[in-house]
Image (tube, grey):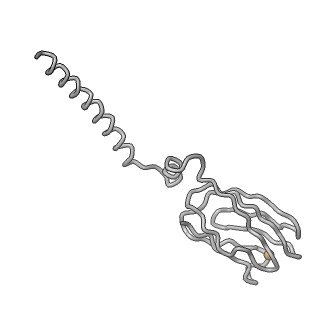
Amino acid sequence: MSEVPRSISAVLILLGIGMSAACGGTSQGLEQGTPKERREAAGGPGGDVSITLTAKDNTFQPKRLRLPAGSDVTLKFLNKGELPHTFTVRELDLDTGSIEPGGSKRVRFSAPDSRMQFLCTIHEFEGQVGDLIPR
Ligand SMILES: [Cu+2]
């Protein structure tokens, strides 16, 4: 008969350990962290996004880039026009400088959590603008 109480107390001790571990996990979960950290925790390596943006005379293709906020973006900028163009995001202090026809440049940035404009500094007043849109 004495074996039964012993095994019950062993179970209770194990439950206690399990519950304190669960509580530790819960309080960490509530702290959350940055959107990028949460995404990395949920989605494995990365939050990395690779995209290609093409410039023509005088427009971008595509004109809207939907990017997960906080992701590490590698953008390949291709100039398929016959004029020089830039890829510029003033709010991010990002600028490829003038890229000659047929040229390309890779830029990396962290995707913003608010909507902002990208543009070609040479042709922005001719409508060569686009939008970065967080999702
Ligand atoms: Cu341009």
Q: Which residue of the protein is positioned furthest toward the left in this rendering?
A: 1
Ligand 1 quarter of the rendering? bottom right
Residue 66's image quarter?
Answer: bottom right
Image check: 101 left or right of 108? right
Coordinates of residue 37 in the picture (x, y in percent): 51, 49
Q: Which residue of the protein is positioned furthest toward the bottom in this rendering?
A: 126
Residue 86's image quarter?
Answer: bottom right
Q: Which residue is nearer to you in this view: 106 or 86?
A: 106
User: Quarter of the image containing the N terminus?
Assistant: top left
Q: Which residue of the protein is positioned furthest toward the top in this rendering?
A: 2
Coordinates of residue 61 in the picture (x, y in percent): 73, 74
Coordinates of residue 85 in the picture (x, y in percent): 81, 72
Coordinates of residue 76 in the picture (x, y in percent): 76, 61
Q: Which residue of the protein is positioned furthest toward the front in this rendering?
A: 1
Residue at the (63%, 66%) spot, across then down: 91
Q: Is residue 32 above or below residue 16?
A: below
Q: Is residue 3 above or below residue 8?
A: above
Q: Is residue 41 above or below residue 126?
A: above
User: Quarter of the image containing the C terminus?
Assistant: bottom right
Image check: 121 left or right of 117? right
Q: Which residue is nearer to you in this view: 51 or 128?
A: 51
Residue at the (17%, 19%) spot, across then down: 6
